[in-house]
Amino acid sequence: MLHNPKWDVEVKADPFSLESLIAWLEKQPADMTYDWHDRKGACLVGIYFASIGHPWDAGSYVRFTNYDTRKRVAGTQPFTFGAALARAREALQR
């Protein structure tokens, strides 16, 4: 069978998706904490954005998934990456 170079298209994951956040959280230390109330980038989403090279600002934060998911995943105690990962996986199942 002949190879068609058009078949080699690379599909990139949406960095603003819950799946991308989960993939990132899986690589983080489970016991590492974050400050949910920090509005300057030390919250979970701010740390995630910094890791993917995305600037931190309120507009970016609003576009990330949706408010309910952000609050449930990042804004619920305990504020550790491991707990956020468990909550993100649960949110993905809904």
Image (spheres, helix red, strand yellow):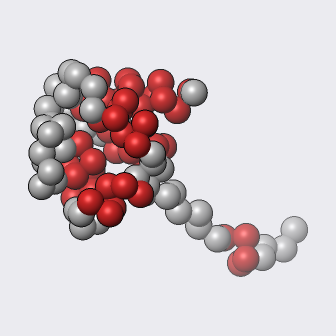
Residue 84 shown left or right of residue 2 in the figure: left
- Work out which quarter of the rendered image holds the N terminus and state it: bottom right
Q: Quick check: 48 above or below 30?
A: below
Residue 52 visible in the displayed image: no
User: In terms of depth relative to the viewer, which is nearer, 5 or 37?
Assistant: 37
The structure residue drawn at horizontal position 28% and vertical position 26%, both measured from the top left corner, is 76
Residue 70 occupies which quadrant of the picture?
Answer: top left
Indicate the position of residue 94 as horizontal and vertical percent values: 57, 27
Front residue (pair 60, 12):
60
Q: Quadrant of residue 80?
A: top left
Taking the spot 25% from the left edge, 38% from the top edge, the residue there is: 28
* Viewer-nearest residue: 83 or 56: 56
Residue 26 x %, y %: 34, 35
Where is residue 34? Give x, y as percent: 15, 37
Residue toward you, 39 or 6: 39
Tell me what residue is drawn at x 45 percent, y 45 percent. 66
Q: Residue furthest bottom?
A: 5
Residue 2 can be seen in this image: yes
Residue 83 in the figure: left or right of residue 7: left
Asked if residue 10 lies left or right of residue 6, the reply is left
* Residue 22, horizontal then vertical, whole percent: 41, 39
Residue beneath the point at 12% across and 45% down: 38
